[in-house]
Amino acid sequence: MRTPRTRLRRRGRAAERGSVLIIVIWVCLGLVSLTFYFAHEMSTELRASDHRAAAVTARQAAAGGLRYAAFILEQFATGGVVPHRDDYRAEELPVGDAYVWFLGRDPDQRPTQDPVFGLVDEASKLNLNTATRGMLEMLPGMTTELAEAIVAWRSRNQAGTGDSTYGRLDPPRLNKASPFETVDELRLVYGATLAILLGEDTNRNGVLDENENDGDNSAPRDNPDGLLEPGILEYVTVYSRQPNTRANGARRINITTAQTRGQLAPLLQQRFGGQRTAQILGAIGNGELRSVAEFMVAGRLTAEEYAQIRGDISASSAATVQGLINVNTASETVLACIPGIGPENAPALVAYRLANPDVLTSFAWLTQVLDRGAIVRAGPYITDQSYQFTADVVAVTATGRGSCRQRTVFDLSTGAPRAVYHQDLSDYGWALGVNLRGSLREPRENRL
């Protein structure tokens, strides 16, 4: 017979078992939650590790691309020659588990949405340490005040607070009073805003990206006209210089005055014979010549004759000549800044280069486009040799999860290429344009 006490005891044991069951269920739920939590953390860490490995892979591929660039220059850029685009591979070059592109520029075309690939000739730009104020003022977006400030920044005779650009500021301050060491030093110059320096090309890739053609919808503020308007950083350098030595290591013959031209006659006689030497020397006379280009037109040298002596003559006695602009690789914008060429003749030079690519081994072709007076005025600022090149290397892993962008300037003026400037531009964002980004998402076999 069940007593009330027995029934209560049984009910208590049932309640106790139910409580235990609930506790067990909660413990199980907690363990399951912990399991999912740690699984999620492991998955996140796995993805993070994968991304870190991809970043390292891309960085190492970029380093490999820079070594390949140095090899190209050592093989194909000897004696001031600009490597031809067909001499090397500049896009989707496999390096390990990644691919490498050399981000370049086309001096004969306006920038578009599609990137240009190749090495960049630093002699195709204005040198901040040698360009005149008038030449600087011709750059797009340049102001008179900024051009004056650039000249003041580099000029030793304006150090101090006197009446220089910087001395007239309130409060007055000192300018550097020495040459620019890097292009990015322009950020320190008075009046150099980011809008002037970068223009619409905020990631400095020479490509019209989506955010650079949408007006005020996103930074930067731009003109949505389908054309890229770069800033002045696109057109300036501090690295262009060429050695004033001949192939045998001797100093080049200075043709500027009759006194310095003592070794010119033996050179001409060796290359062209006595009769032609007399004709050339008679044509140039005893007057002063300001440039090799002026010597070429004054002596009425043919393109073939000039090519035979171009590496033996100079208009300077210095060991190196700084800041000459290579008219074979300079863009229309830069050509328009050169006295004697200007905006009125620059389009004609670009058109002639496009129509006659085989003649771009020297600047003798200028006689087909410019008159003698224009060549004489342009002569002190131009060259047809280049010894500094930029490799703007973009590396992307095969999975697309890692990318790296490294820009290095190589100098060949002393022989083998050596890196004189290096900059990591990975933080500037995607640099290969929207079209290539879309194609990289496809399997590689579909892109071949």
Image (cartoon, rainbow, N blue to C red):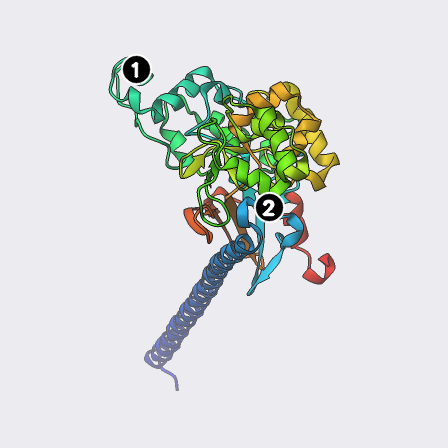
Q: Amino acid at mark 1?
A: Leu
Q: Is residue 26 left or right of residue 229?
A: left
Residue 334 in view of the camera: no
Frontmost residue, 171 versus 436:
171
Coordinates of residue 74 in the picture (x, y in percent): 52, 55
Frontmost residue, 227 versus 279:
279
Badge 2 crowding class, 10 Å Cα cut-off, few under 14, some 14 to 19, many 20 or more, is: many
Coordinates of residue 412 in the picture (x, y in percent): 47, 48
Residue 170 in view of the camera: yes
Q: Amino acid at mark 2?
A: Leu
Q: Residue 88 occupies which quadrant of the picture?
A: bottom right
Of marks 2 and 1, the one in the foreground = 1
Query: Disc 2 to disc 1, how far (Cα)?
Result: 42 Å
Disc number placed over residue 169 in the picture, else none: 1
Q: Quadrant of the C terminus?
A: bottom right
**Residue with the mark numbered 2:** 432
Residue at 47% of width from left, 18% of height from top?
A: 143
Dot 2: what SS?
loop
Q: Quadrant of the N terminus?
A: bottom left
